[in-house]
Amino acid sequence: KCMETKYKRGLDHTYLILELPLLYEEDYQMKMMQANRIEGLLAAAGQGVDGKSQYFYEISGKTSLRSLYEKLEISGDELETLLSQILRTVHNVRKYLLDAGKILLDPEYIFFEDGKYEFCYLPVKETDLCKEFHKLTEYFVSRVSHRDKKGIRIAYQLHKATMEENYNLEKMLEKIEVL
């Protein structure tokens, strides 16, 4: 299932649109997201168009993680902030009976503004949160500042921990936060 990424810029809003070749079904997840402002998730809407599903995320004034660190390196402190916000978002999503595995952890779909990270929640996502987090740790290893000992330690510890089979994402993040 190939996901297509588009951007729609209006006069005062910018949207990220994820389009999938699936029939759109409005389920409890979208209703839950629209009825509640879930901290850590981007505001989202969904619709069906020509037999496809489209999900719209409000990204006005926000920068993707990929753009943010295209030319800059990530420091240990920045990694800690991002990790604690991933953990908090996972907890928040579960409070609303949503599946944390449907949070997109690709740097292109993580957005930053005013010290806060926000994530796309994709109701039809099928990939595993742990596999996706492992890919994110590979990104950290490639973007971490090699002059920042703390950053290097966190990035490599995470990467190593995510290579173990059946690791627990939350336990691992909580352990690293304490370090």
Image (cartoon, rainbow, N blue to C red):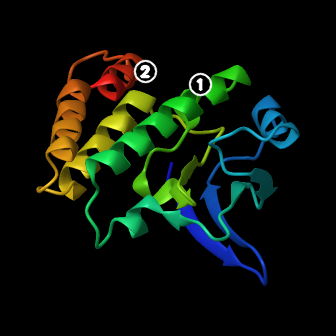
Q: Residue at x 18, y 57 (%)?
A: 145
Identify the disc placed on residue 139.
none
* Mark pair 2, 1: CA separation: 9 Å
Residue 137 in the image: above or below residue 51: above
Which quarter shows the C terminus? top left
Name the quadrant containing residue 66: bottom left
Between 20 and 79, the one lying in front of the other is 79
Residue at image position (12%, 56%) is 147
Count of number-bearing discs = 2
Residue 80 shows in the view: yes
The label shown at residue 91 is 1
Label 1: how many Cα within 10 Å (few below 14, some 14–19, many 20+)? some
Outermost bottom residue? 11
> Looking at the image, which residue is at 78% across and 39% down?
33
- Identity of the residue drawn at 21% across and 54% down: 144
Position of residue 101 measured from the top left corner of the image (x, y, whole percent): 53, 30
Give the residue at mark 2: 170
Residue 146 pos. (x, y %): 12, 55
Residue 122: x percent and y percent? Answer: 62, 43
Q: Secondary structure at mark 1?
A: helix
Tell me the kind of residue under disc 2. Glu
Q: Quadrant of residue 67?
A: bottom left
| Residue 2 x/y as whole percent | 50, 54
Which is nearer the N-term, disc 2 or disc 1? 1
The reply, left or right, for residue 151 in relation to residue 15 is: left
Amino acid at pointer 1: His
Q: Secondary structure at mark 2?
A: helix
